Image (spheres, grey):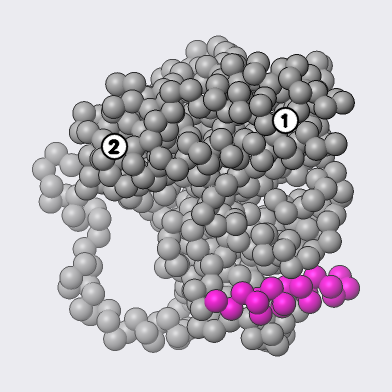
Amino acid sequence: MYENQIRPGAVTRRVVLEVGTAASAVLISGRSSSALAADVPNAPPPVPPVTVELLINGRKHSVSLDPRATLLDALREHLALTGTKKGCDHGQCGACTILLEGRRINSCLTLAVMHDGQAITTIEGLAAGTKLQPLQALFVAHDGFQCGYCTSGQICSATGMLSEHQAGMPSLVTADLAKPRPELTEAEIRERMSGNICRCGAYPNIVAAIKQAAEMPA
Amino acid sequence: MKEFTYARANSPAQAATIAAASGTKVIAGGTNLLDLMKLQIETPSQLVDINRLPLDKIEDTPDGGLRIGTLVRNSYLAADQRVRERYGVLSRALLSGASAQLRNKATTGGNLLQRTRCMYFYDTTKPCNKRTPGSGCAALAGFNRMNAILGGSDQCIAVHPSDMAVAMRVLDAKVETVDPAGANRVIPIADFYRLPGTTPQIETTLRAGEIITSVTLPPPPPGTQIYRKVRDRASYAFALVSVAAVVDAVGGRIRSARIAFGGLAPRPWRISGADEALSGVPVGAAGFDAAATAALDGARGYGGNDFKIPLARRTLHAVLTQVTRA
């Protein structure tokens, strides 16, 4: 039995938001791609949907989607996990950062179908119920955001970054590459987090939150 | 994004067979290909996914070098202890490219095959001979600050954007491939990239369907290794100029040196005359100047990128000064 995308009857914020616009949206663009293709003479037959099994935040999900669906769109549009944000959709801003098998990646630059059977952690999977994970609590304590749009990407990225550092991975500002685990200085944090843009400019507080998280006993 | 069918390869040769079909693209990390597909610069009708192939190992070779599987992610290659200790120039070049998230996804083979970031290649409303052969080159008289000063043609002045490839070039890496018949081939990286000439859309010497399986590094050359990248911001930006160098200097004299530039040309730029200009000469400005002159022979600016000529010269000076400091 799989945990399916939206449980029947469950009213989420997303469902409420969509109710107001659904009727008009269907009139404008509600036709399926197969209906469109059928209208065009000699068009190639539409590509059938593929079934993909994803282990998201510890739960199995089976989704049927167009092979073109990015992992980001699968999470947001098919599974209603809207904590992961779409910023640039081109791998430049980091708002869509998730953990794939524990490794941080941009979910906008990969296809869901490529990750059949793999484990994904999103921002929704970090907290234990209502108890924030230390890094999340420290972002609050240090005021590590303003508008908050980049924050889930920042926190997922920082989570991945701290495990990379634990595993001894170097960065460009690491002076001695042979040294197994360089000290996580502010310069190290900034370099390692350069794939996450914050247009509000909350960087000093983001760095402070991550630095304190890194100094906490594991 | 245009519609495509998706296939997952079971073996390298099978992937090559699928890839040989017209309209098919191989996908590994996908960080460049999917970006280009979203912009409809690449419009494959079929993707063959090679991510599940067992090509993700870094192995010692009998001669004391390394064999890097094509699917080794950039971050893992940079962090490998053998690479950090013996091929520091490669580790540094990788760490200076992209962001941590992209390096966690991008692969060794994919990094070599990434396309240019020339803004006219990306702008489908403008002519580009690389994207649409015969349409013209808008960069020649356009905003060409990031474009090539060496190796370009009157059809294309796009730059190869990789940092990793510049380090691979200075280390004399070899690209190993398989074709649809299952035959293997070894291509020295010096022969891997083609200059644009009149066919800028053909970027490498790979044949139809031929797939990279690994990259080998010979044993590290003697000397100190360095990678220096000059760019518009301190992190996560493409190079204006980069220099990869391996310099063996003792007692104020250079015994041997290798230098390669990134950010200047359609491929990593290495000129044997520049290496020779440094061989056996005393450490100092005269030798560094001679090397820069040899490396930049034939360089020309197109207006916006004129600055790259003095910048390349100065960056080389800075690198050689740093690496020969006792």
Q: Residue furthest front?
A: B286
On the image, numbered disc 2 is attached to which residue?
Answer: B140
Q: Name the foreground residue: B268 vs A127.
A: B268
Residue at disc 1, secondary structure: loop
Please name the predominant secondary structure of the magenta segment in the image.
helix
Residue B81: image location, x then y, percent:
82, 39
Q: Measuring 29% from the left and 27% from the top, which residue is drawn there? A: B154
Q: Name the foreground residue: A188 vs A107.
A: A188
> Which residues, given as a range, are shown in magenta?
A201-218
Q: Chain of mark 1?
A: B
Residue B290: quadrant of the picture:
top right
On the image, numbered disc 1 is attached to which residue?
Answer: B284
Residue A11 vertical position relative to residue B58 in the rendered view, above or below: below
Task: Work out whether residue B198 can be spotted.
Answer: yes
Q: Nearer the viewer, mark 2 or mark 1?
A: 1
Q: Measuring 64% from the left and 36% from the top, which residue is drawn there? A: B317
Residue B35: image location, x then y, percent:
42, 49
Q: Residues within 10 Å of mark 1 (few under 14, many from 20)?
A: some
Q: Amino acid at mark 1?
A: Gly
Residues tagged by mark 2 and mark 1 found on one chain of the structure = yes
Residue A96: image location, x then y, percent:
52, 65
* Magenta-colored stretch includes residue B280: no
Q: Chain of mark 2?
A: B
Q: Measuring 54% from the left and 37% from the top, which residue is drawn there? A: B312
* Magenta-colored stretch includes residue A215: yes
